[in-house]
Image (cartoon, rainbow, N blue to C red):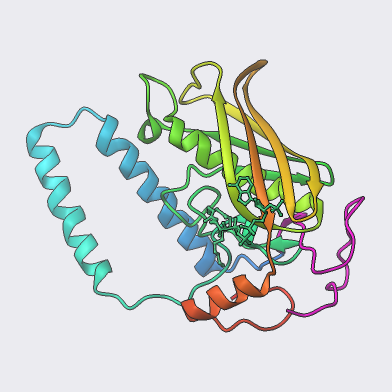
Amino acid sequence: MPDERPPGRTAPPGASGWAAPFITGEADVELTPHRLEKRRLAAAVRRIVDAAISMDLSADEVTSLADRLDAMASELSDRPAAAYEGFAEAATSPWADGFFDRSPVLGEANALAPPIRLEFSPDRIVGRVVFGAAYEGPPSCVHGGWIAAAFDEVLGAAQSISGAGGMTAYLKVDYRAPTPLHEELVFEGELARREGRKIFTTGRVRHGDLVTAEAEALFISIDFSRFAEMRRARGDEVEGTTGDA
Ligand SMILES: CCCCCCCCCC(=O)SCCNC(=O)CCNC(=O)[C@H](O)C(C)(C)COP(=O)(O)OP(=O)(O)OC[C@H]1O[C@@H](n2cnc3c(N)ncnc32)[C@H](O)[C@@H]1OP(=O)(O)O
């Protein structure tokens, strides 16, 4: 782990030292045509998932679509794995920004992700999202597990305001009211306090003026060399200042 902050990045109020990752935004990674096409591919898969569970399709149409998609899936699964690029979640970005395209929550290039779009500021993280039909729990409402996943990501980014990122130890969610599908939701996360390695965060999700769920999470700061080890074990070349693969 390099011990100097990359040039041009500044600490938020209260951050000290630089074993101390905090996240101020997405990395300034060039959106090459290849990366943009990966995002477009993921968007198309999202639409297929949505349509597959929510459209009125005849039995013949279902069979025809299943045949075509099954053939495509077989073709894809025969391909070798791509080099790993970026971070799967904000909490693990060891520098002030990251490239989160493959995150299951944020990832523009991950069809599983809704995706949530984060806005970073020195004292708060805001995440905006519209959950589609694939994320349904109660009728017309977002599945509670996805609400928890969203909080883990938003609070995972918020904990970095402490200047010492770590791993989720616990996440508690209070579901106050049903959270609707197909509507813009606004997640908010803040640092509550830091006690040594313990980083306490709080957050909520709003639909308009209504708070539909609140959350608290504890993160335990860790030596980021542990992440580097995990990434090496995954096959990444871990070097340079950003930690990006
Ligand atoms: C690129 C690589 C990406 C890899 C993935 C990174 C994911 C990062 C974001 C996430 O973590 S999301 C995944 C869900 N979380 C996990 O998988 C974490 C699994 N748990 C652990 O790895 C360890 O339990 C943990 C790092 C959280 C803590 O282990 P440590 O051995 O570093 O700390 P320790 O157990 O000594 O606890 C330190 C302090 O925190 C307290 N603590 C730990 N867990 C707690 C808990 N659950 N509730 C309350 N307090 C807790 C503990 O009591 C103690 O308090 P004191 O210092 O006062 O004695």
Q: Against 169, is 32 above or below?
A: below
Percent position of residue 99, x then y: 62, 62
Does residue 221 appear left or right of residue 228 in this picture?
Answer: right
Depth order, front residue of 2/129: 2
Is residue 7 shown in magenta? yes
Question: Quarter of the image holding residue 164?
Answer: bottom right
Does residue 51 appear left or right of residue 40 in this picture?
Answer: left
Start-end of magenta stretch: 1-27
Picture residue at 17% right of the left edge, 46% below the top: 65
Picture residue at 36% right of the left edge, 35% below the top: 134
Percent position of residue 218, x then y: 66, 44
Percent position of residue 238, x then y: 62, 81
Give the quadrant of ligand 1: bottom right
Magenta stretch, overall SS: loop
Is residue 189 shown in magenta? no
Picture residue at 71% right of the left edge, 82% below the top: 240
Picture residue at 13% right of the left edge, 39% below the top: 61
Depth order, front residue of 140/193: 193
Percent position of residue 176, x then y: 56, 17
Does residue 18 appear left or right of residue 125 in this picture?
Answer: right
The image quadrant where one finds the C terminus is bottom right
The image quadrant where one finds the N terminus is bottom right
